[in-house]
Image (tube, grey):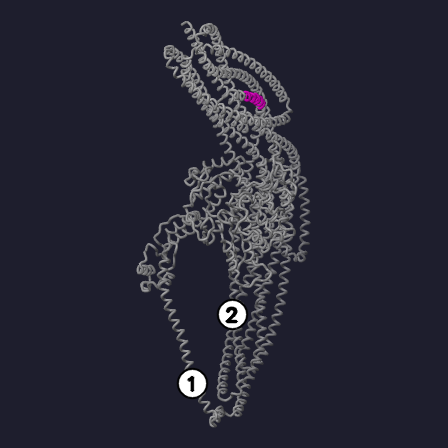
Amino acid sequence: NTKKVITYLAMVATGAGKKVEKKVSLEDQIVATNPILESYGNAKTARNDNSSRFGKFIRIHFTQSGRLAGCDIVSYLLEKSRITEQQSVERSYHIFYQLLQPYGDGICDGGLRAKCFVSNDIYDYIYVSQGKTSVASIDDNEELEYTEDAFGVIGFEDWEKFDCYVLTAGVMTCGGVQYIQKGRDEQAELSDTGIETFAGKVAAAFGVDAAAMVKAFCKPRIKVGTEWVTKGQTVEQATGSTGGIARAIFDRVFKWLIEKCNDTLIDPSLKKANFCAVLDIAGFEIFEYNGFEQISINFVNEKLQQFFNHHMFVVEQEEYVKEGIDWVMVDFGMDLAAAIIMFEKPMGIWAILEEESLFPKATDKSFEEKLKAALGKLPVFLKPASKTDKNAHFGVSHYAGVVNYNVTSWLEKNKDPVNETVVELFKSTSTCQLLKHLWRDHPGQPTITPKDDGKKKKKGGGGKTVSSVYLVSLSELMTTLYSCEPHFVRCLVPNTHKKPGDVEPPLIMHQLTCNGVLEGIRICMRGFPNRMPYSDFKMRYACLGQAEIASSSDNKTAVYALMDKIAFDRERYRLGHTLVFFRAGALAGLEEGRDELVIRWVRFIQGEVFKRVRSRVYEKKRDQRELIKVAQRNFRKFLSMRDWGWFVIIQKTRGMIGMPNPEEELRLLEEKANATYGEYKSALDVTADLESQMGSLKDEIGAMSKQLSEEQGNVSEYTDRQAKALSIKAEAECELAKQQNILVSEEDSRAQLAGEVKAHAGSIGAVKKDMGDIELAITKVELEKGNKDHTIKVLQDEVGEQDEVINKLNKEKKHLSATQAKSSEDLASAEEKVAHLSQVKSQLESTLDQLEGGLDKEKKSRANLEKAKRKVEGDLKMAQDAVADLERAKREVEGVIANKEKNNQLLSAKLDDEQSLVAKAQKNIKELQGRVEGAEEELEAERQARAQAERQRSDLAREIDQLGERLDEAGGATVAQVELNKKRESEIVKLRKDVEETNISSESVLSNTKRKQGDAVAEMTEQIDALQKMKAKIDKDKTIIMSEIADARAATDEVLRAQASQDKSNKALLDALNATNKKVDAANLTLGDYGMSKNKIANENSELLRIVGDLDNNLNMVAKSKSALGAQLNDVKALCDNEARERQLLLGKFRNLEHEVDGAKEALDEEAAGRENILRLVAKAEGDAALLRQKYEVEAVAKGEELEMTKMKLTARNTEAEATIDNLSAKLTQVEKAKGKIQGEINEMTASLDQAQVVNATMERKAKAFDKTITEMKGKVDRLSFELDVSQKETRNISSELFKVKSAYEETALQLEEVRRENKTLSNEIGDIMDQITEGGRSIHEIDKIRKRLEAEKLELQSALEEAEATLEQEENKVLRCQMELSQVKTETDRRIAEKDEEFAMVRKNQAKALDSMQAALETEAKGKAEALRMKKKLEADAADLGLALEHAIAGNAETQNTIKKYQLQVRDAQIKVDEESAAKSVAADDKVNADRKAAAMQNALEEGRSLLETADRQRRSAEQELADTNETLAELGNVNQSISAAKRKLESEFNQLGGDLDEMSNEARLSEDKAARSMIDAARLADELRCEQDVAMCLEKDKKLLEAQIKDAGARADEAEVNALKGGRKAMIKMETRIRELESELDAENRRNGDIFKNLRKSERTIKELTFASDEDKKNHERMQALIDQLQGKVKSYKKQIEEAEEIAALNLAKYRKVAGALGDAEAAADATEQAAAMRKARARSASLV
């Protein structure tokens, strides 16, 4: 795995050398990072006990020599969710379990557990005990020991290590913090925060106060506007916030550990040449539930697989094409492009996730819908088809398969929020240093806003999300990978139960698919992954066919011949231009054939080698045996002859045979040695003389070389000065061109000012007087000029200041360039802002057009809705007509019944069947009653929910009242508002009285209807007694009635369905209306953005004005530097002339040096001749040595050692002579190098001259370009001023729109009061309707519909009333239509009630008549009494149902009456309010017009004042600048005089120095002549050396002549320099005098202009103060109005929400009213049918009694 690879690389890089004791090596530190990262980043999973839950990229750096230089680690995607939750078979990170082990007791005082505030039971901590708590293959105690050692090896300090442990324990302890709910509120709280509680332990671990921490979790602070408020948290929210803080702390601790390791592992003393990196990251994941973590990991694997494909196959194919093999390009990298593009494109998955994360109201549902809308048509974006996750939202087709993802909680995970109040608590009060360090980059909630220190505040960017950070790190990783040479390793798990030797093929195939190995194999099989150059191929595989390889010089032909010989299929390989390509596995066949041959040859060679080794051993043994025989034979002979006398004599005299006489030999050797030593001694004397002469020559050569180097140094100094002067000249010429252009513009401005001066005729006398004074001053200046001539010599010491002036000019030039760049950047930013504002304006205009179009569509849809409503009413009338037709049909059926009375007996048999049906019906009734009870329970729950909603509504009402009070306070200053409030209160009192009267009248009507119902019930009981006699007829009627009831129910269901569809369409229209309201709200927000942009433009305008002022200052500075540069240019021209003359002198010196080089060559030739003489002497000495050697071999054995010493001395002399020759040759090379160096310097000087000329030309072009840029800048400034005027006009328009919004707000406030009253009345009506629903015994279906509708109402109550003013006219139309409908309904109900009263009267009369007949027929029906009693019960039940229906009808009638009255009152109130609002609107419009006029007048005055101020300020600045320029020019001219005098003094000193040098040269010449004389004396004794000394004397003579020539040149140059200096000084003085006169005249003119400008300036300053005071007042008023507008906009939004809610409630009440009206009609129809049936029965009873 990864740690093994890292350990191997670290050990290999450092080698096997011995380590230094007591010093931690870098490789040990690199290896020690693994235990820390495993403890904090590894955990047990379902498949692996030690799985790395984060991706890491570890780079090991090496030096150029391969030595280890350091290491760094980059992490990716730490799995933070594992910190707070795990599955049952997994566990959290190892460090949590290591902290509870006993090894920690010895780490610190008191033990690690006590220091970390933890116990020894892991189950005390919920976060880490949800799954497994121990792993069999891991010893947590031992791992803690490794972790502790690793901290020490890497170099963590003790406080860092223990803070890390304590924070980790605090994260684990956070799971035990359990919040409770405070009473009936949803506020979370935690009262007990002692040190023994989990909250106290967490606070102690984090180093904060426990109570403050709990308060921050339960009641965090949020910023509303500019104020901080406290927000209550529920138990669930507080618990989630605690978990978020724990995850964030662990994540930051982990990243800090990696940073700390990186700091330790980098060796800064070593240079990093390359690195070897290991990327260990999670593979492709397909789980049962795939969420945010899986899609992130899978996207990384998509990118890595694309990189794999590109590297392995795209590069491969390029190699194929380059080599010219037969191949068709296949873009394997594009196989993954579709999915990657879907993720990365501008509206891809990541972009949509980022966008949704920025919206506070975004939900998982909206994110899912946006994904499907934007990506639903892509082929890789699929519908969910998961078998394991039924709630998956979409699928993605990856390279490894289709994965179905669930988007639940993606937005929350991406935002990764933390409680900022808790973070601020950590940063400000924590005693844990590491915790403060971890949160240092988080903004928190600072109580004191840091000051900007005058800097422009930058626009703050949004917070970083998880996906944005992850994508940035991924892009950096891919960039690094593409710059590396990668190798790919795929890790596979053979089985899930960790059993060795067991293989699960499906699991392995799944991993191969996810890892992309199968994809790689598929692509690899199509290509040629193996390749080999022809040279390597021939070398390696020529053994398979040497003749074929040698058969042709063409590589392809030879390889084809070899492959065809061994029958290798051509499909398995290809031949390129330089390489042989093989398919996967093809090379193995060649290797097998080669291995067979190699094995056979190796065996043969091994046999030969063994043969030779053993033969040598055999020969040695044989020779030993023969030698033993010889030794034995010789020893036997010695034993036999050792006592023989002659043998003894021979042995003793054998050494003296042939020996010479030693005394004679010694004598001869002495004579020869004496002769040889005499020659040697003379040679030594000659050598000593030569050495002494060589030392003197060396001294002379050193002196000459030193002189030569000094002369060369002077030449280099002159060249440097010349190059510097040329560069200064080029720069000065560029600056001169610039300044001339500026001077032209300044002259124009000066001419204009002169024209203005002429206008002031009254000041001419004063000007003339001033001119006289100036003439006197000029005379004084001329006198002072004479004095200055005398002080020029004194000022010559100040020449060095000229360099400072040059540096100053360079700095000013840089400053000007920087200022220009800054101004161009500012202009570019201003242009971008203007473009952005114009774009926003166009967007707002398009949005306004869309809103207007939506409004038109809404009007059309409302008209269509009215049409549909009228159509439904027509259908209702048609249905009523159909009911009338059915009643007529019923009468016809009754006639048929009379004919069928004969079939009574047949129907009696069916009575039993009907009884069974009745029993079934009773069972159904019981079931329905049970359902009704359940519905009633649900209704009770709904009541409770409604009560809660009422409480919320009351809270909202209180908030609205508070807002109303604020509104009253804000608008209480106007008397009209107070009168309107009084009128409204009186109207409210009237409305309340009307409501009470309507309630009283409705109660009286209800009592009358109940009384009538009681009478009707009594009459019905009498009818029941009569109907008992009509048993058979009733059965027959019953069947008919049942069929009729079924038909009526079918018709009713049809009507209900139509009504439901109508409600659905109405709801759709309401949704459209809400959408339109939201758009209008967005338009309001854009208006607010316009206001903000207006303020921003104002700020930018002031910034641009400041920039313009800076530009003016810069122009003045340029004008100032112009005059200085002009003077410098003249000086530089003079210097350039001098440098040209010096260049000519240098050329003369160069020619002299060439002559010197020729002399050195001649000296070298002489040295070469001397070397040849020395070689001759050496050859002679070698010949003598050879003779001596012969004598030694023949005669001088005894004196061999002395001769050997002589030989050694001679060889030493020889080596010394060779060394002398080498030195002379080295000197010759040095002379040649000096010549080359001088030639190179001359070339460089010429090149530098050419470069200076080129630079001069370029600087002139740049000056022209700079003038163009100045003109462009002026044009941009004009354009910006025009855009500023446009923006001010837009500001005025926006202010007018602001007054419109204020008037609209007042209208909305009035409507709010109406909505409040309507809301109260409608809530009462809802309560009444709910009571009626409970009493009415509706069906379960209706109750469910009502409950759902109420839930929808509850949700819609929270959405809010928006855009009331836009719908005001529509509401008036609605009210009028409702009034008309109510009048129609009222007339129709009155008519029907009258008809029913008449019918009831008729029924009473008929019942009275029938009562007598029934008494007569009572006796005849005695037998059927029992039967009648049974039927009586049944009929009583039917009567009870009819009674209930009648009660409902009566209640509906009363409700209808109440509703009619309420609507009439509402119509009257609305009409009154409309009149009042129209009057107020007209008044507000008049006020707005007046205010606009005043604002426009003030704005015009302000603009005029600003323009006057700007012109005066510019004139004042220009005058001051010109005055300063004049003073600086005078100062600079004085500096020029001083520099000229200093230059003269310097030349004089140089001339004196040259005179001294000439004296020294003459002395050296005399010394050299003396030496030459001594050399002549020595030459008499040493004839061989005479020529050398003569040559040296000649060289010295030549040097003398050269030096004299140089001295003459130097004198001439000094004279020329003095003459030039005098000429330049006179010219400069003349120029200075003329310039002084010009400047004095200009100074007088400028003084006069300055006085006029000061007068205008005072006037403009007074005007400016007045205008600034007025503008400040306007600004304050505007800010107050803006604050009021913000408050009013908030109130308008809330009022709009309430109005919309009231509209929805009114619509629902209208629908309920219609339902009740329908039910009333049905009840009336049923009552009519019953009455008709009763009449028929009475008639039959009468006919039966007559019979």
Going from the N terminus, do you reach mark 1 or mark 2 first? 1
> x, y percentage for residue 531?
38, 57
| Count of residue discs | 2
Q: Which image quarter: residue 595?
A: bottom left
Label disc, if present, on residue 630 of the rendered structure: 1
The residue that label 2 is drawn on is: 1229
- Foreground residue, 1475 or 1300? 1475
> x, y percentage for residue 178?
60, 39
In the image, is residue 1322 part of the stretch drawn in magenta? Answer: yes
In the image, is residue 632 part of the stretch drawn in magenta? Answer: no
Q: Distance of mark 1 from mark 2, alpha carbons?
A: 69 Å
Q: Which image quarter: residue 212?
A: top right
Q: What amino acid does circle 2 point to?
A: Thr
The region drawn magenta spans: 1312-1328
- Foreground residue, 295 or 177? 177
- Foreground residue, 345 or 309? 309
Residue 1481 visible at all: no
Mark 2 lies on a secondary structure that is: helix
